[in-house]
Image (spheres, helix red, strand yellow):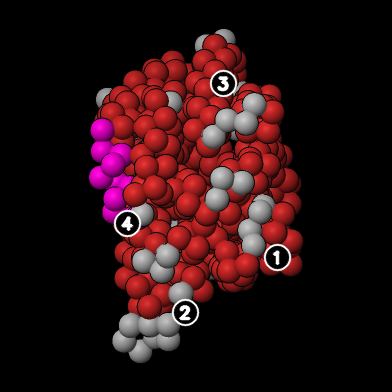
Amino acid sequence: MKFRFRRHNSSNSSNKPREVIDHTEGSIIKSILRMGLPSMIGFGIGNIYDLIDMYWLSRLGPEPVAAITILGPFLWVIHSANMVVGTGSVAIISRRYGEKNILETEMAIKETVVLKWLVAVIFGAIGYFLAPHIVTLMGARGEVAELGITYGRIIFIGLGFNFATYSVFTAMRGVANPKMAMILMISLSGLNILLDPFMIFGWWIFPEMGVAGAAWASVISYALAFLVGMGIFYAGGANVRLNPGNRRRLSWLTMWRILKIGVPSAIGSLSFSMARLVIMPMIAIFGTGVIAAYGVGQRVSALGIMLLVGIGLGLSSLIGHNLGAGKKERAKKTVHQAIILATSIMTAIGVATFVGAGLIMSWFFDDPEITAYGITLLRILAVGFPFLGLYLILENVYTGVGENRPAMFFNILHAWLLEIPAVYACTQLLGYDQNAVWWSITGATIISTIIFYGYFRNGRWLQVKV
């Protein structure tokens, strides 16, 4: 079904009605695929970039891979700040769009981008100055520590472009332009993939920069993607145009509402990230080889996660559209069909990962000992993939309705009451090897998902208003 937006009264708005697809009508599964598939492809390509990035760095030896792996949990902590604005903006932008209120949708996008830059400047500075202390605390020494600091500080310098670019993607999905977001995400990853070897190894006119080259390639790619994305919005290429002539002031009330919605999600994400900070030193005691295998294993696992994140983000916007249109029953059916789709995808990825673990690890390492570490890691984590798929969908349900406290609670339960105690007991008290860590992570995922799903079935999420 097609509809035309009605323009809300505003002498300063030049937004014109656009004919767009109404995802609150018609086939539910088609709506999920239309909104989720482009995001899934975009995030999938982005994760392939991460794997290629790790591959190029692995050509320099296990030390660069270990350095980025050790730095990873700290990067996740800093990126938790991105969630404060990001998850709140999903609910606000998609809900206003579902209400057909184009002016308020435009303002919400502008306010989100401004907030993202403010948050990025603050947390980028924190990350830049704390990086040396954190990598040492995490167990890095010598060359591994130096490489981690170098990579991290460059990423923190460009953090504003990173944060704001994801808001461009969110805004495009929120106004029913997921394919546009997908194309921009693929272009971002493609440029990053292209720049990586040139800047890491010093090909053509570029100096050889090693780990620093990988970081600068990422910053440059995000900067260009942000500028192109904003250009699309201001040029009127999306369903909602950002009008430079609109003199209406940004609303601090709306910004506060975005932050208020996003804070629980950020706390949940921070809890998960801090848990990784705590767990990382307990992994580091097993040596550089185990750390390197863990880093590659995380990137491989993240391929499935990012596919589900793409579907989940499309789902979040769909829920906002449906609830904004007052169609609760359709929102409920949408979630149930998304759950079936997500768990099926993650089951297939889990089986493929389990079977192909040896081949995957042989792409990255020539050392048979490191390869063996990685094979066992991948096979253990693959057991929990179907549950992880369900968990990610449930998180995005609450993101879509603008109520992130349940997800925050279950993130804390997962990380601090299930995962960390199990890892600590196995490695510090019982003296088990690194495989006990992987089983602890998988077990915590399975248990927390079952409890989360039990809570979701009470249906209270349908009553949330923003």
Q: Going 32% across and 56% down the picture, which residue do you hit?
A: 366
Q: What amino acid type is highlighted by mark number 4?
A: Asp
Q: Main secondary structure of the magenta part?
A: helix
Label 3 or label 4, whichever lies nearer to me, is: 4
Q: Using the numbered discs, state the Cα–Cα distance from disc 4 to disc 1 in whole angstroms.
A: 30 Å
Judging by the rendered image, the residue that carries numbered circle 4 is: 366
Kindly indicate whether the residue at mark 4 contacts the one at mark 3 (C-beta within 8 angstroms): no
* Screen quadrant of the C terminus: top right
What amino acid type is highlighted by mark number 2?
A: Met
Real-space CA distance between mark 3 and mark 1, rounded to the nearest whole angstrom: 34 Å
Q: Where is mark 2, residue-wise?
A: 209
Q: Which of the marked residues, 3 or 1, is nearer the chain's N terminus?
A: 1
**Magenta stretch containing residue 452, yes or no?**
no
Kindly indicate whether the residue at mark 1 contacts the one at mark 4 (C-beta within 8 angstroms).
no
Residue annotated with mark 1? 132
Q: Which residues are magenta?
A: 355-365
Helix, strand or loop at disc 4? loop
Distance from Cα at disc 2 to Cα at disc 3: 42 Å
* Eye-nearest disc, 3 or 1: 1
**Relative to 76, is 382 on the left or the right?**
left
For disc 2, the neighbor class at 10 Å (few under 14, some 14 to 19, many from 20) is some
**Image height of 22 relative to 371, above or below:** above
